[in-house]
Image (cartoon, grey):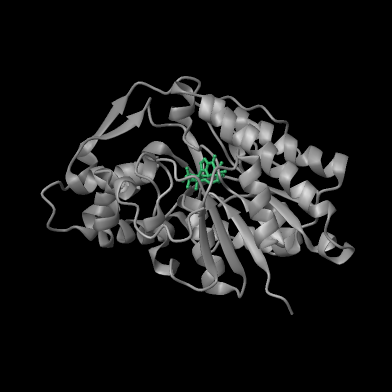
Amino acid sequence: MTQQTLLITGGAGFIGSAVVRHFIENTNQKVINVDKLTYAGNVESLESIASHPRYEFVHADICDGEAMAQLFAQYRPHAVLHLAAESHVDRSIDSPVDFINTNIAGTYTLLETALDYWRKLDKSAQAQFRFHHISTDEVFGSLGETGLFREDSPYQPNSPYAASKAASDHLVRAWHHTYGLPVLITNCSNNYGPYQFPEKLIPLMVLNGIEGKPLPIYGAGDNVRDWLFVEDHVRALQIVLAQGQPGETYNIGGHNEQTNIEVVGLICRLLDELLPESPHRPHCSLITFVSDRPGHDRRYAIDAGKIARELGWRPRETFETGLRKTLQWYLDNQNWCQRVLDGRYRRERLGTRGQA
Ligand code: NAD
């Protein structure tokens, strides 16, 4: 049997790097990681597999149609896992333009390239090909006290980030319905875990807590998010890619609704326990409240029943077990954190073998 080749976009990011590591470690597939290496891309997150013979890194922008066409022609992927995106809500509020370019125009460019490639495949390769678009529950807007996002919930994105991801979901769906491209869409709740960039809530609180810096929480800290350990997300993506029905959407979530203050409270409790000698105990004394983000969505919560019923996926980690693993990882990997915080991960760019 010929070796399968998976094209992963955004594989130097938080979730993308977990996907790359997982497919290298758990399958026989060749993995091509296409990443522009924005501030969020860090090849040091891929150190453990960087010299693996089935792994290649290509430094390219998904908005560059010629580079994408060349990539498809050279590597002939059996599937695309599309994760490349601008992903930070606060940055999208301050400067939406990169979100429009990468998330919308970049997804369009990738779809056009994939369609052109797919049309030239023979019938059996066409039937096997998948374009899997990785998206967020933020496209559904905000929930009240009750209710859950389902696959058929209306799209009501509130931030520029969510609106750009919603637009990309619609394009992917249209490329299936109009042109027949075999697509899959997954909408996932908030992820946490190792290698997350320290601007996001959980790593920011963990690293500030370790250093005894303030732990700033938006508003009253009562916004609710549904948290999923990143490796549970990655397993869900692998299952959807292998068994999902083309044209279908699957919601992925951890059944772990927590207010932000609960999240930070648990981080403080775990830090107290894991760092018994720390001069910053009790870490909860570091919590401060700052003015809320404009248009801050109140509550997100996912109904992940469809993927459980149809594909048999369920998360393995509870919030406490996943958070414990995450904290331990940040404590054991201070070097990775330091190189991100002082910018060396960008200046030195170790291990970018195979740049285009
Ligand atoms: P991230 O910001 O950590 O990583 C994004 C990666 O994309 C980076 O490596 C960056 O260099 C790359 N990239 C950005 N623009 C690019 C371009 N034009 N061309 C090529 N590469 C480019 O993001 P993440 O948190 O890992 O999220 C990955 C995907 O999952 C995104 O599509 C995001 O919308 C989605 N998602 C994230 C979460 C979450 O909680 N983090 C939840 C649900 C869905």
Indicate whether 71 appears above or below 164. Answer: below
Nearest the viewer among 292 and 83 is: 83
Left or right, 70 with respect to 118, comes to: left
Q: Position of residue 171 (x, y in %)?
A: 74, 36
Rendered residue at 13%/53% (across/down): 278
Name which quarter of the figure residue 240 lies in.
bottom right
Q: Position of residue 265 (x, y in %)?
A: 32, 44
Nearest the viewer among 272 and 108 is: 108
Rendered residue at 86%/63% (across/down): 122
Nearest the viewer among 268 and 5 is: 5
Asked if residue 277 can be seen in this view, the reply is yes
Q: Position of residue 214 (x, y in %)?
A: 22, 35
Indicate whether 113 appears above or below 101. Answer: below
Name which quarter of the figure residue 66 lies in.
top right
Asked if residue 133 can be seen in this view, the reply is no
Indicate whether 334 appears above or below 187. Answer: below
Rendered residue at 45%/54% (across/down): 319
